[in-house]
Image (cartoon, grey):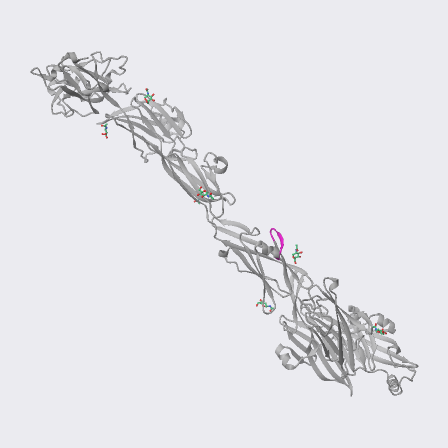
Amino acid sequence: MLSLHGLCCTSWLVIAAAVVSAQKTFNQRPGLKTECLGNVMRLTADKLLASGSQLEIEAVNGSKVVPLTPALAAKCGYSVESDPWGNAKFSASLLSCFIQNQGDHVFDIRLRLRLFGNKVSEEDVTEVTHSCEFKQWASREILCERNFMEISVNRLPPEISLLEQMQDTNGDSLTQVPTSIHNIWKMVFYTPKEKPMMLRDVEKAGYGVKTTPTRLVVRSPYNMADTYTQNVDGVQMEVLSVTTYFKRGWSVTLIDTTAACPTGGLLFTDNIITWYMPRYIPTVMDQEHRILELYMGINGKRLDPAHMNAMGYTLSLTDSHIIISLPVGGPDGYYKSHALSYEYHTTYSIEPMLELLWKEGMSDVTRYKVHYPITTPPKPQPPQITDNTVAELGFFNMLLGTFLHDVELINITSSTGVMTLAEANVRGFNVQQHGFSNGSKAFTIQVPFSDPVVLKATIDQETTTYTLPLIFGLVILPEYTPFSHPALLEITVQDVTPPTVRGNCDDENFYVTVTYGNQGKNFNVMVGGKDLFTDLYAEYSVHENATHLSMTVPFLANEVTFELAHQSSIRARLHALLWDPVNNWHLKNFSLACSFPLTMTECFSNGTMTALAVKVESASRMNPSQLTLNDPSCKPTFSNGRFAYFYFDASSCGTTRTFYDDVMMYQNEISVGGRNSIALKDAVQPDYHMVVSCYYMLNDTQMVTFFTNPRRHEPFAESGVGKLHVRMRLAKDSSYNTFYMEDDYPVVKYLTAPLYFEVDLIQSTDPRLELVLENCWATVDGDSTMSWDLIVNGCENPDDSHRTTFQPVAFGELIQYPLHTKRFEVKMFTFVKDDMVLRDQIFVNCEAVICDIKQPDAICRGQCLSQNVGTNTKVRRGTAKQLHRRHISSGKIVLSSFRSELK
Ligand SMILES: *[C@@H]1O[C@H](CO)[C@@H](O)[C@H](O)[C@H]1NC(C)=O
Ligand SMILES: *[C@@H]1O[C@H](CO)[C@@H](O)[C@H](O)[C@H]1NC(C)=O
Ligand SMILES: *[C@@H]1O[C@H](CO)[C@@H](O)[C@H](O)[C@H]1NC(C)=O
Ligand SMILES: *[C@@H]1O[C@H](CO)[C@@H](O)[C@H](O)[C@H]1NC(C)=O
Ligand SMILES: *[C@@H]1O[C@H](CO)[C@@H](O)[C@H](O)[C@H]1NC(C)=O
Ligand SMILES: *[C@@H]1O[C@H](CO)[C@@H](O)[C@H](O)[C@H]1NC(C)=O
Ligand SMILES: *[C@@H]1O[C@H](CO)[C@@H](O)[C@H](O)[C@H]1NC(C)=O
């Protein structure tokens, strides 16, 4: 399996982290801890660093301060590492360059930690000194650190040791110097090819070489030109193999040093890290070795079995391997976020330690110690968007997560641009961070549906779909590595209130009010195929405000449909369509039908008739200009697309006249092409018929009936009113030129003077009518307890010795229709009996009948003609057919015997 050695997260010595305090000395600085862990000293700085600050570590060599660059650290035996919390781990081999070594027993270290804030002035220097005691040196010590391999042996040449002893006993008197690094003649590296190098070149190449009072120390960073890799039982190892030549006078001593450090041997599953170490490493072990001790540790510290159990760590031995397994996610390691190809990943890092002591031959013991930093392969952890939106609340509610603690949400990109979190919150997004107990975090974001970044689409007339596309901009601390995550939320809500329409009418107009729904004015209004706003705005007096729209539509407007026409009213319907122009939806159909007063037919007493033909819904293809009366030459006096107006005389245009008991009816019919236009009726022309009738009744009120008949099954029959007048007047003399007026009554007359009465049908111009006086009689007063017959059954009363006589009526200036007028003369002696005036005042009454001269029947044969036909079949008064009879009376006439009182 892959080795991830070196896939560490931070660059050497430059660490940014979380908390800083500014004390100047080590003793006062909390969070700093130094430990001696065998042949290693470890310094941990807990959350030492504030975000954005940097740590630099310097070694103190006497009075000089030496900055530890990565290369110098690897060469000299130092290593440093930080985690995302800002915890720094520093370790130094006790055999490292700048440690004060007192007889290979006591080791004093001095370090300076320099913290750089964002501002140079905030520089903060802490000096750390520590002493470690370590006496249990094995003959050979192999240390595999994260950045270097180190081997030390206690096999300095014996003569040198002897000199040392002499020095000890004899003080400084000897001129010979101890065996030291200066006695090294050359070094030979095996890769495995031999490569000899002079000490100067070895140091220049980046290797560390050192002698202590008893030991030779050789150190190499990984991946050097003179190291090589080897596969040992499936585990990749890096090998440093050097022979050092000491020369003293003529004597040369050779010391072999070999270190082999693992760079592979890792197997990862989602939950377990397994680290395989070869049990037998040929380059550093004798076949005949005996394992004395075996430890597992974490962060350089040995663990006891109880702690290992608790953490789920195992250390086991097979024939070929030493196997350590560690669960992913344990508290000894840490998670870290990564943005690989701009996508979110996490890794887990832990640094186990393996320490092994073995014996070869009688006394040669080797301590083999590996600090092995392991980081799992980056695992994609696509952030999840959890949509917690509740439609009724009116906002999107989402959870974005989970992330490790080292992720920050920086900005949000919406359809309108990028905003920072602060800007988003000001805008009304509610962005909050939530921490979990395991250190993870998530973010909640709430965005009102009404925010302009939310896209709205109306799905149907009641439903809206809200869509929220967002991109979250995040960074990973402390490196500020950016990555992003998109979110697309969508919800469909039944939240549309459509507009409502209501209306009413008066005698002239429809009044329509539209109340907007909660979408405002999102509609157009169509009336009769026209757009209200573009075509009819002024005509309909449209008024608008924020919530309503009102219009006033005259019932005669072109867009109004006529349903039915009655005698004196018309039923009209307004249809309006509320229409969504964006989605092309019909939001509302509105229909309102009302009856409006409209005179369709007028019947004048003089026989003039008018008729208005209306194009009603059921005759929608009718062309009013083609309508005529029965006589096709009688065309409308006015017509347009919807109306035809006829003005004609009762005696013209094929008007028929019918007598009924009490009424006389003129009738005509409006149709296309006239009554007899068979050809037209068969053609595509609509079957439009409108019958116009005027009923004249023989009293002061004449009913007129009117009906149209556009379709067989749609009866239209309504009554109208017209007037026909019969008048009785008393003439001043037989010339019938002057008459007594209303104001002249009571008229005073002498007994000797005859009375000249005239009864006429006024105003009518119909020459086919004749007024016949059926009966006339005189009474004493309003009631008729006493009466004298003057005319009986149309003739002069034959029983009267002073016979009433009819006077001829001739055409003249005042008489246009002689048949409309009857005159008779009454002798006053009629009212005298035995020379006694019966009463001194009378009223004269008549029953007049209007006759059709074309249907001479009974009394209508003519004035006094019936009697002439058969005297022996005298029709008794009251038994004659009561035809169109009109009762009229004269005013009071006073009879006087004294002529002198006459005017
Ligand atoms: C440490 O200081 C001593 C004496 O000042 C010097 O000889 C030695 O070279 C220095 N070591 C390094 C690694 O600079
Ligand atoms: C931390 O807790 C949250 C919420 O319980 C969970 O979703 C997340 O997976 C946990 N993270 C880790 C690394 O265990
Ligand atoms: C928003 O955040 C992303 C990811 O962190 C980053 O790449 C981008 O530059 C940021 N945009 C702005 C305008 O700050
Ligand atoms: C808008 O007009 C309607 C009727 O047309 C009226 O009832 C309403 O009060 C008006 N609203 C405003 C804000 O003027
Ligand atoms: C309104 O009427 C038109 C035709 O008259 C019809 O197509 C439409 O579906 C109707 N719309 C509604 C909402 O009733
Ligand atoms: C009949 O009377 C009407 C109403 O008074 C008048 O308009 C019309 O001209 C008259 N017709 C004739 C023929 O006199
Ligand atoms: C005329 O006749 C109608 C119908 O019979 C009647 O209702 C009305 O009262 C009469 N008018 C007069 C003035 O007599």
Which quarter is ligand 2 in? bottom right
Choose top left, top right, bottom left or bottom right for residue 485. bottom right
Question: Which region is colored magenta?
Answer: 414-421
Q: Is residue 817 left or right of residue 134?
A: left
Front residue of this view, candidates 867 and 567: 567
Q: Position of residue 618 (x, y in %)?
A: 37, 35
Q: Position of residue 807 (x, y in %)?
A: 19, 13
Q: 23 or 376, which lies in front?
A: 23
Which of 713/248 is in front? 248
Q: Is residue 749 above or below residue 475?
A: above
- The answer to whether 835 appears left or right of 155 in the picture is left
Q: Residue 854: image x %, image y %?
A: 24, 20
Residue 418 part of the magenta-drawn span: yes
Q: Residue 653 in magenta?
A: no
Camera sees residue 51? yes
392 displayed left or right of 140? left
Query: Which quarter of the image is occupied by the N terminus?
Result: bottom right
Q: What is the quadrant of the C terminus in the image?
A: top left
Left or right, 293 with respect to 894, comes to right
Q: Position of residue 624 (x, y in %)?
A: 40, 28
Residue 292, image quadrant: bottom right
What residue is shown at x 40% (from left), y 25% (from top)?
A: 638
- Against 903, residue 715 (above or below) is below
The rendered magenta stretch, by its main secondary structure, is classed as: strand
**To which quarter of the image does residue 331 belong?**
bottom right
- In the image, residue 132 sits, relative to residue 885, either above or below, namely below
